[in-house]
Image (cartoon, rainbow, N blue to C red):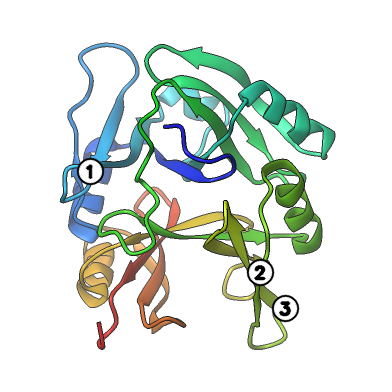
Amino acid sequence: MRNKHGTPIWYELLTTDPERSSEFYGQAIGWTVGPRPGEGPDYRMLVTADGSNVGGMMHLAPEMVAGGARPAWLFYIGVDDVDASVAAITAAGGSVHLPAFDMQGVGRLAMVADPQGNPFYVMRGAVDAPSTAWERTGMGKCNWHELVTTDQVAGNAFYADVFGWTFPDKMTMPDAAGDYIFAAAAGETFGATMNVNADQPTPGWLFYFRAPDIEKAAAAVTAGGGTVHVGPMEVPGGDRVIVASDPDGAAFGIAAPGAAA
């Protein structure tokens, strides 16, 4: 997955119940979840309707939960050199959760966090084929990334320093919540950052995946044991979105075409 340095390349769900999560996300977003591997960790592929992979689902075994692991969505940022990126991350005030290691046939990766404690992975893929897991309007793909942070100024400076991100525009949020600052990697706007606020009180990265119909998606979230926290609502650009959590409590978003699409 050798995409340009600093671009998102993969998404990963940590779950305590892969079977329940498979059914939940199949109904809410339309993914097909691959089978459990015959050996090794329980890691299943999340497959879109066009047959491409958007990410993976990792089973949190009881011993992992006992060690502090919690259900969550994470993402991987593609880099030119994992070890150099880890060094830059720590020099810029970030931290290392899982030191760099090689995974045969996959690539080299490390789990890290920004200075505000928001976790993510960095990765250099083992093959030259680019990832298409992030696609602005791709059905079933990740369409948008939001960083909710306790220090937007410091966080933006960190990502600019380590990954070369730029912040080309901003939008003032209602209720004096501060600015919604758009973020671009390799010249393409892929998301935004904001400070914690009443609607988004929990820091961390939030990923919006695309579904055909937001009303049906919201109903499927509720029917499947999840919770819709925000929306459905229209956002600039015409999409309609929700912010939700799955039955495990992992937060995520869904985007869908608006009425005019």
- In this figure, which residue is indicated by the disc labeled 3? 178
Closer to the camera: disc 2 or disc 3? 2
Looking at numbered disc 1 in the image, what kind of residue is underneath it?
Answer: Ser
Name the side, left or right, on which 36 lies relative to 250: left
Query: Reading the chain from its start, which is encountered first: label 1 or label 2?
Result: 1
Q: For numbered disc 1, what is the local secondary structure?
A: helix
Closer to the camera: disc 1 or disc 2? 2
Q: Is residue 234 above or below residue 38?
A: below
Q: Quadrant of residue 170?
A: bottom right
- In this figure, which residue is indicated by the disc labeled 2? 168
Q: Is residue 102 above or below residue 94?
A: above
Quadrant in which the N terminus appears? top left
| Residue 27 visible somewhere in the drawing | yes
Q: Position of residue 204 (x, y in %)?
A: 60, 53
- In this figure, which residue is indicated by the disc labeled 1? 22
Task: Give me the C-alpha separation between circle 1 and circle 2.
Answer: 37 Å
Q: Residues within 10 Å of mark 3 (few under 14, many from 20)?
A: some
Quadrant in which the C terminus appears? bottom left
Say which residue appears at 71% left-offset and 25% top-offset: 84
Q: Residues within 10 Å of mark 1 (few under 14, many from 20)?
A: some
Name the side, left or right, on which 189 lies relative to 151: left
Say which residue appears at 78% left-offset and 60% top-offset: 151
Closer to the camera: disc 1 or disc 3? 3
Looking at numbered disc 3 in the image, what kind of residue is underneath it?
Answer: Gly
Looking at numbered disc 2 in the image, what kind of residue is underneath it?
Answer: Pro
**Is 153 or 88 nearer to us in this picture?**
88
Q: Position of residue 211 (x, y in %)?
A: 25, 64
Q: For numbered disc 3, what is the local secondary structure?
A: loop
Task: Give me the C-alpha separation between circle 2 and circle 3.
Answer: 16 Å
